[in-house]
Image (spheres, rainbow, N blue to C red):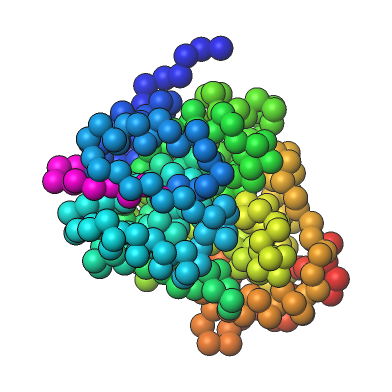
Amino acid sequence: MSAPGPDTVLHVGGASPYDVVVGHGLSARLPALLGEGVERVAVLYAGALGALADPVVDALVEHFDVLALGLPDGERAKTAPVAADCWEALGEAGFTRSDAVVTIGGGATTDLGGFVAATWLRGVRVVHVPTTLLGMVDAAVGGKTGVNTGAGKNLVGSFHEPAGVLCDLSLLDTLPRAELVAGLGEVVKCGFVADPVILDVVERTDPDALTPSSPELRELVERAVRVKVDVVVGDLRETGGRDGHPGREVLNYGHTLAHAIERTSDYAVRHGEAVAIGCVYVAELAARAAGLDPALVERHRAALSRVGLPTTYDAASFDELHAAMKVDKKARGSQLRFVVLDDLASPRILAGPSEDDLRAAYAAIGGVR
């Protein structure tokens, strides 16, 4: 096996520019990303990580006073009470506006830690060190932060761009295979909405060869991050794209149903798995409501199932999922809005599809109408 190549630095422009670094063994880069003037750093980490967080903490204690704050695992971290506990800890430790937050964990840790950084003293620096594939290609880049409520996922949050992101592929070595596969849901999504080369890589690569040290997985990570960077730079606050493009909303391809599945299953279904199901669902919807080529619908099924992701769902009724979709943050009033494809890498918004089409699309992925 060849040695990993040099680090890749992807620059995110805009009003608050920062770098996303992809490579192996990146902990030494962390102090420079935090910048000068920082005295205290709060490290918010997923409690189950244990020793995996040690190299990151070791890189910090040589330069800063470190406050380590363990968080509940998964979506249980993304609640207002957990955020409030973090605020209290920052206050007791005397954190000022020139101090910083570092997150170490998956997407839930990144969302919660970013929200704490965004709201403490109306915003302090944050650097994300995602430890899951999902976190690397989705939550860590773009500045979206948030917590969940009883009404739905990510309905409370803010935009707060990080000072930097370290996508250290070495941290994926101990990631359970099911979690790695789940992260590929967001990667394949990027292939359908923006970069078809991602699909080519997935379709020509033995799924078992997609490992943290493989050049194929690294290429997929870098391409998915570039997709998100390009979209975010053009539409940071999700106000809309140009010439009919959905702008940042395009990143929510498949997410309307995905969030409903997560909520109705009490988050028993992994986010990337739910996104995979949601992508097939919205492709079926586009075939009925907007004339999407059935061959492209089948390509959704083939690409996602090839890497081991689910493409069917029947664990909730349509009525349950429909009710949950109505509180999706893309909705406008009582009207549902979906990101759909007219063709490969040609997305647009479909507003107000008929209930008949919504039900038929759910039946097409194995659900009960």
Closer to the camera, 20 or 157?
157
Residue 213 % position (x, y): 54, 23
Q: Nearer the viewer, residue 112 or 196?
A: 112
Which quadrant, please, contains the C terminus? Answer: bottom right
For residue 302, which quarter of the picture? top right
**Whether residue 251 is situated above or below residue 164 in the rendered picture:** below
* Residue 38 belongs to magenta span: yes
Q: Is residue 245 visible?
A: no
Please name the residue shown 17% across and 54% down the image.
98
Total numbered labels? 0
Depth order, front residue of 328/264: 264
Residue 173 lies in what quarter of the image?
top right
Q: Is residue 58 above or below residue 146?
A: above
Quarter of the figure that contains the N terminus: top right
Task: State the image coordinates of residue 253 (x, y, percent, origin top left).
Answer: 57, 60
Which residue is found at the position 51% from the left and 63% from the top? 78
Pinpoint residue 306: horizontal percent, then vertical percent. 73, 39
Q: Residue furthest bottom?
A: 334
Q: Position of residue 212 (x, y in %)?
A: 55, 28
Image: magenta residue range: 35-44
Q: Is residue 168 above or below residue 258?
A: above
* Relative side of 303 to 231, left or right: right
Question: Residue 205: in sight, yes or no?
Answer: yes
Q: Residue at x 47, y 14 (%)?
A: 3
The residue at the point 22 percent across, 58 percent down is 94
Residue farthest left in this picture: 37
**Residue in front for this viewpoint, 259 or 283:** 259
Left or right relative to 171: residue 237: left
Confirm whether the magenta stretch covers residue 19.
Answer: no
Residue most toward the front? Answer: 92
The reply, left or right, for residue 318 in relation to residue 16 is right
